Image (spheres, helix red, strand yellow):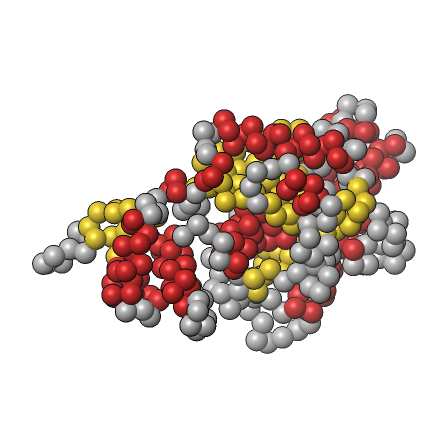
């Protein structure tokens, strides 16, 4: 890990304290000498900081190292209940909330149907109440909540949490972060859900900080996030990673963004379902028709995958076409960014390794040949709460950067 080495004399003491605390979170339990060595600080400096953190009841003894001879050094750890932070995933179909303690352990989760999202103001009021009630049920004091990170699938304005456009919600120009903050007693941060998922994926895969990750979210829609080291690349306007709106088929269907043939319009979960619905509506013979019991409005991408896994040729053809287009789209990102790793996550990647293999095959056809390339392409480690966990992680990263943790 690389820690902050800023040398501003007015901030060096606080920076040292933050780095010691972060070392305890990331690498603890750990002893004082090991902290000093890891951060290139003197042992007296570390001892003074540790004494202060002890006094504030932010850390605790985790016992002594049972090795060697002579006096055994005490190892230290963070007090898990010193503070908590929350992540919320505002999905179009499902709302998910996760609460983490100070050491990052998940202590509570919930999910429920998102419900009607229009009008936006009324939905946000209901959302605020759900968050407050869920935290209260856990018995956590308001003062111990550092903040809540929210993630949602939308084009967001950089730094403000304003929703520019959320087609699946019918929202345009909604000051989401300001409205949420106005009804919650703790700090609020709003980010795009794919960016949140990318930050989480980068965190759990523990890449070296000099590495770059292209995380592609393949779900109801398609988006991407670019993480360099531990930093999310947001772009000048905060809208980097709109891979789903790169055109891969100029003669393709109209996309919600107004262009034709966008990756999202031809290969997302919504697009896969729509293609199957169209084919079945023309009385085509397929296992999908049996699965939907004659009601084509019930067809979703999961149903198409199920039919394909059962050997249905039509379903397999739909997914093969989607995989080819996804491979083309992802190869565009790789050719431009040259990342060390591509992580494919989201609902479409929870249907077996064969879909990943088809995407890889398409990518290989469209990548610029390079003898030195060592690109890793893998399915994400994420679960259904990954966007919520990523939103919480972005919140914590922001608080670290702003020096706004209560230490």
* Residue 86 at x, y percent in the picture: 53, 41
Q: Please, is residue 63 above or below residue 202 in the view?
A: above
Q: Residue at x 77, y 39 (%)?
A: 169
Q: Quadrant of residue 188?
A: top right
Which residue is painted at 56% across and 28% down in the image? Answer: 133
Identity of the residue furthest to the left in this view: 70
**Identity of the residue drawn at 50% across and 26% down:** 137
Q: Looking at the picture, tell me which residue is in the foreground, 59 or 391.
A: 59
Left or right of 139? Residue 176 is right
Q: Is residue 316 among what the camera can see? A: no
Please state if 161 lies on the left or on the right of 172 as rendered. Answer: left
- Place of residue 378 in the rendered image (x, y in percent of width and height, measured from the top left): 57, 55
Q: How many marks?
A: 0
Residue 139 occupies quadrant: top left
Q: Position of residue 254 (x, y in %)?
A: 88, 49
Whether residue 129 appears in this view of the structure is: yes
Identify the residue at image location x=63%, y=62%. 233
Spot occupied by residue 401 in the image (x, y as percentages of width and height): 52, 59
Residue that extends furthest to the front in the rendered view of this protein:
10
- Indicate the quadrant containing the N terminus: top left, top right, bottom left or bottom right: bottom left
| Closest to the observer, 378 or 173 | 173
Q: Nearer the viewer, residue 187 or 127?
A: 187
**Residue most toward the bottom?**
371
């Amino acid at each position: 890990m690389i820690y902050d080495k800023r040398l501003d004399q007015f901030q060096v003491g606080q920076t040292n304290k933050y780095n010691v605390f972060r070392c305890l979170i990331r690498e603890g339990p750990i002893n004082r000498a090991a902290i000093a060595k890891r951060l290139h600080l003197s042992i007296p400096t570390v001892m003074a900081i540790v004494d202060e953190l002890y006094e504030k009841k932010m850390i605790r003894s985790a016992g002594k190292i049972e090795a060697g001879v002579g006096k055994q050094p005490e190892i230290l750890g963070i007090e898990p209940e010193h503070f908590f932070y929350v992540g919320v995933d505002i999905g179009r179909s499902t709302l998910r909330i996760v609460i983490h303690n100070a050491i990052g352990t998940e202590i509570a989760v919930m999910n429920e149907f998102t419900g009607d999202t229009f009008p936006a103001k009324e939905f946000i009021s209901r959302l605020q109440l759900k968050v407050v009630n869920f935290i209260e049920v856990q018995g956590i004091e308001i003062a111990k909540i550092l903040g809540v990170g929210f993630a949602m699938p939308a084009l967001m304005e950089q730094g403000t949490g304003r929703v520019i456009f959320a087609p699946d919600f019918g929202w345009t120009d909604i000051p989401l972060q300001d409205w949420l903050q106005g009804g919650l007693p703790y700090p609020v941060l709003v980010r795009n859900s794919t960016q949140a998922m990318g930050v989480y994926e980068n965190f759990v895969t523990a890449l070296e900080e000099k590495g770059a990750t292209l995380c592609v979210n393949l779900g109801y829609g398609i988006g991407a996030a670019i993480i360099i080291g531990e930093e999310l690349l947001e772009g000048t306007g905060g809208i980097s990673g709109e891979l789903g709106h790169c055109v891969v088929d100029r003669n393709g269907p109209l996309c919600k963004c107004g262009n034709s043939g966008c990756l999202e319009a031809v290969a997302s979960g919504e697009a896969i379902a729509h293609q199957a619905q169209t084919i079945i509506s023309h009385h085509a013979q397929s296992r999908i028709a049996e699965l939907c019991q004659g009601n084509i409005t019930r067809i979703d991408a999961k149903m198409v995958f199920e039919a394909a896994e059962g050997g249905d040729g039509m379903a397999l053809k739909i997914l093969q076409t989607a995989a080819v287009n996804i491979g083309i789209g992802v190869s565009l990102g790789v050719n431009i960014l040259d990342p060390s790793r591509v992580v494919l996550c989201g609902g479409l990647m929870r249907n077996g390794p064969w879909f990943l293999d088809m995407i890889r095959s398409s990518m290989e056809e469209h990548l610029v040949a390079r003898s030195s390339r060592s690109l890793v392409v893998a399915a994400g480690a994420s679960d259904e709460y990954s966007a919520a966990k990523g939103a919480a992680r972005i919140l914590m990263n922001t608080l670290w950067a702003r020096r706004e943790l209560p230490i």
